[in-house]
Image: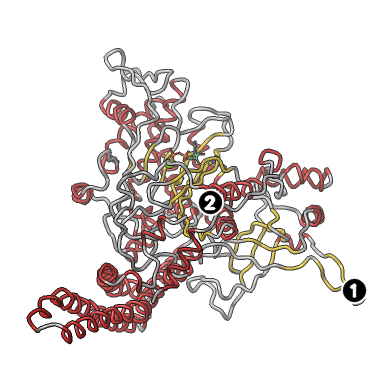
Amino acid sequence: MSTLRFELLREALGRTAVPVNNENRPAEDFAKNVFNREKMQRYLSKYTYKALTDSIDKGLPLDRAIADGVATGMKQWAMDMGATHYTHWFQPLTGGTAEKHDAFLEPNANGGIIEEFSGKLLVQQEPDASSFPSGGLRNTFEARGYSAWDPSSPAFVVGDTLCIPTVFIAYTGEALDYKTPLLRSINALDKAATDVCKYFDENVTKVISYLGWEQEYFLVDEALWAARPDLVTTGRTLMGHESAKNQQLEDHYFGSIPSRVLAFMTDLENEALKLGIPVKTRHNEVAPNQFEVAPVYEEINLANDHNILLMSIMKRVARRHHFRVLLHEKPFKGINGSGKHNNWSMGTDTGVNLFSPGKNDTQNLQFITFLVNTMMAVYKYNGLLKASISSATNAHRLGANEAPPAIVSIFLGKQITEVLDKLERVSTDDVIHFDKKVALRLGVAHLPEVLLDNTDRNRTSPFAFTGNRFEFRAVGSSANCAEAIMTLNTVMANQLSQFKIEVDNLIGTGMTKDKAIITVIKNMIAECRPIHFEGNGYSEEWKEEAARRGLDCETSVPLIFDNFLKPESLAVFEKCGVLSHAEIESRCEVKWETYTKKIQIESRVLGDLAMNHIVPVASSYQSVLLDNIYKINALFSKEDADMMCRQNRRIIKDINAHIEFITEKCTEMTEARKKANVITSEREKAVAYHDTVVPLMDTIRYHIDKLELIVDDRMWTLPKYRELLFVR
Ligand code: ADP
Ligand code: MG
């Protein structure tokens, strides 16, 4: 019978850790494969180097003649690193990255070959983009989009290829990727935040926003992975009964890291460090075979490129160790899924973290200003922010009993909560002192001083203040962080401009600056109260309470996407210059289309597996039982036989009932797909998939999982949860 499964298990169990090349010297090799400033200085003329770094620092366009100089130096460096090809590396809306490799070699007019890489090829290219999703922005007849160099993120070499980070835009200028709006949002936030910072320090000329991501993932042995068509095709298990033991003992979290996994992690870190990704933290996560890797935070655009790059390196390195890495948000039912906490903060070019309580009254008022404006922005656009992290894959994680729920709220911790409570009540005529050590004394002597405790944590909150940053935890493990972060940057930029207008208005009436700021903040604290929630985000009561508070509680992903098209969302993106109306519409089309495709593929795979793995195996087992009954009846008296066969007769009937359900529901599911497929509106199609196909998938799975418990283990072909999750 299913000897294959046991062979694969033996193979997986027999593996030992793959030795890691210990010639690596992480400290010396850091950024070895990156064309960073040190390399630029070595490979570019003084003049070119200065022009390039100036244009990067000031965000100015690069002169064509300079680009030629940069290209020559960059090519030389890449060839010294062993590169033979180059590619524009960009982030289309399909997810992941796209690259088309071209050789440096080009035929010349004399029938020979020369090495060619001009400034023109560095700066702009036209990948044949017709098969990337554009949501109707660029139909295939117009075909062309182009990729354009983003000099603010350094080029790097992977294998034999020089990779040049680029944006990807349509010929008409619309963004077709994740990076373009992210860059626009970074600029919008810089401008709005700098304006507000000037209330507190005239010397601030730039605000830099930062991202520190924490990437969660699962590892599965490649032999077992290969025997699970659902994992191979969809990245998650579409069936599988829960293992008797999974995460209830909490013995995996922060436990010692298994040796095969440690070898993988070390190898991954070495590769990441060479590419300048400052990875720092690694540990086991809550679920069995679940892990996390996190770098030191960086400027957002760079941090995001590094995350995308790391995700692709992970896949490659995992294969060297006979693992497959699962970046899906919910590869296994019943245990924790994977997220990607986005730690987000802002800092001035004078070195002040705007989310850190400061050293004096002014800095603390600045801190409170940015904190409360964040709350206000998240409050007004909580539905939009939820839309920015929603996807078919993340849907399994949101609202399931684990962080975070499908409602966006903010956790502040006890100290900050007290500070805001006091601030809301205090009269603006009182003297306000912020204590040196951090939080504050408000009013005069009658309020106690509060010391900020950074360790206050609430793991159930999707958006938490953690001492010197906000942690947006609802982002999915497979997502491009750019979607969430560009949305957050945009609503924050908008909020800060709004704040400035209100404060300036009050100053215009003759109010002092500090009093005007405190007056506006007090009003904001009162208004955004509903977003503030310190309790258990997983509880049923919170869902009811959140609805009463008017927060977005929608759970259907296709409907959540509607938030992008609300007038206030269109207005905020347009006003901040991040996305135009047409760009948002096209992105929503892509989101709905992607949602439909993901569910469609899963549903087909489930149907196939049900009909050609599960039902045949269950029928075979039924035959074994029937055979057994037949033989017993031949050898024993009717009375004895009846008694002896009672149990098997019951099992045969059970199996029959499950098989009947499965086949019936698979037919229904095919019908539901057929019906949905003819719908022309992408939105309506996605809604139909959500409403009609997904529930059938859940029912089918339920019966398959029951069969897994009944059928003889030796006959079961698919590796089980207890094997996928515990063998390593
Ligand atoms: P935890 O799991 O306790 O949240 P980790 O150490 O796993 O902590 O991850 C914290 C992440 O937050 C790291 O990527 C870290 O660099 C990042 N981080 C720390 N301070 C800031 C900050 N001011 N702005 C943005 N990210 C930050
Ligand atoms: Mg964290």
Q: Position of residue 347 (x, y in %)?
A: 53, 35
Residue 386, horizontal then vertical, whole percent: 36, 54
Query: Mark 1 vs mark 2: which is more N-terminal?
Result: 1
In the figure, is residue 121 to the left or right of 275? right
Q: Is residue 180 visible?
A: no
Q: Is residue 33 left or right of residue 553?
A: right
Q: Which residue is mark 1?
A: 112
How far apart, in angstroms, are the residues tagged by discs 1 and 2? 49 Å
Q: Are marks 1 and 2 in contact (CB under 8 Å)?
A: no
Is residue 294 or residue 344 the one in the foreground? 294
Q: Amino acid at mark 2?
A: Arg
In the rendered image, is residue 468 in sight?
yes
* Position of 654 relative to 34 (above/below): below
Q: Which residue is mark 2?
A: 260
Q: Give the residue furthest to the right.
A: 110
Q: What residue is at 39 percent from the left and 27 percent from the top?
A: 510
Rendered residue at 60%/58% (across/down): 320
Crowdedness near tag 1: few (<14), some (14–19) or many (≥20) residues, C-alpha within 10 Å: few
Q: Is residue 574 left or right of residue 151?
A: left
Indicate left or right for 319 with 717 as reference: right
